[in-house]
Image (cartoon, helix red, strand yellow):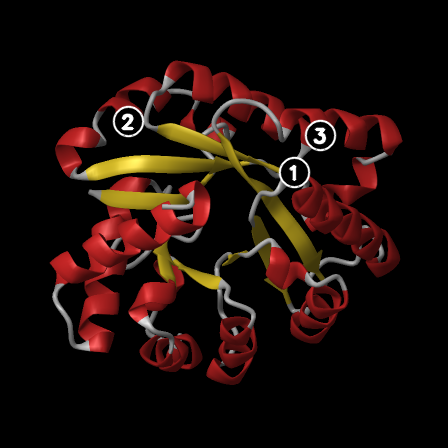
Amino acid sequence: MIFESHAHYDDEAFDEDRDALLASFEKNGIGRVINVGASLESCKATLQLLRHYSFMYGAMGVHPSETGELDENGFAWLREQCLADKIVAVGEIGLDYHWKEPEAAVQKKWFARQIELAQEVELPVIIHSREAAKDTLDMLHALHAEKTGGVIHCFTYTKETAREYLQMGYFFGIGGVITFQNSKKLKEAVKYIPIDRILLETDSPYLTPEPNRGRRNSSLNLPYVAQEIASLKGISYEEVVDVTEQNAERLFFGK
């Protein structure tokens, strides 16, 4: 079964058909799903989803673009939720310099605090890094984030950057971008990254792969991602599905 390692099914884009969509997963070969928090509100919504869907697990964290909302009270609540049933990671956390707000100092403060939280509760991290390759790596090294382990979500950097993360023992979340014609740099990186370090993800409802690019994304599109990885690495589709599922189990469940 395909293991969906990063989705946002609490998003309003799914309000009209969420139940029907999620109910269709099993017959379409989608097994377990990690629903990933991006704000305090989305973390609350994620906790609700986990109660309703047995195949869904969660990550608690505040996305760098939402860190302006964080204060000590909110952070204390976040810490408490990381101990809840079915929470398997801290994320998504990191740095995003594509937008000017919140400022980098605020993002860095809460990125560091959330890495320390992951170390405290002994959970892996789900890292968001956009236009911030050096600062992300520098902070992970400085905070000894290799101790938690984790995944670089929506990895789109070079194979040289991939080498740095491999040395830290991290996994790589590969999604719809790998199917884009202009993703040459990512395709080269995926050829380089060992298959036992790759996770399948969508970032639903975003980053829909070809041939459905431009529409709302869902885990039902993951076969396109798996097939592209299989083609790039010269292995079977079935091997990609099986190994990436094992990888996710190893990271999130310690199996």
Circle nearer the N terminus (1, 3): 3
State the residue position of label 3.
78
Residue at 54 percent of width and 21 percent of height? 47
Inter-mark Cα distance, 3 to 2: 28 Å
Q: Earlier in the sequence, mark 1 or mark 2?
A: 2
Give the distance between the C-alpha atoms of the residues marked 1 and 3, in whole angstroms: 11 Å
Q: Secondary structure at mark 2?
A: helix
Residue at position x 74%, y 70% from top? Answer: 135
- Asked whether disc 3 touches disc 2, contact meaning CB atoms under 8 Å apart, the reply is no
Tell me: residue 160, above or below residue 92: below
Mark 1 to mark 2: distance in Å? Answer: 33 Å
Of residues 218 and 133, the one drawn nearer to the viewer in this rendering: 133
Q: Nearer the viewer, mark 1 or mark 2?
A: 1
Q: Residues within 10 Å of mark 1 (few under 14, many from 20)?
A: some
Q: Amino acid at mark 1?
A: Val
Visible residue check, residue 86: yes
Label 2 sits on residue: 21
Measured as percent of width and height from the top left, residue 165 is found at 54, 72
For disc 1, the marked residue is 121
> Which residue corresponds to the image point at 55% horizontal and 56% vertical from the top-left?
149
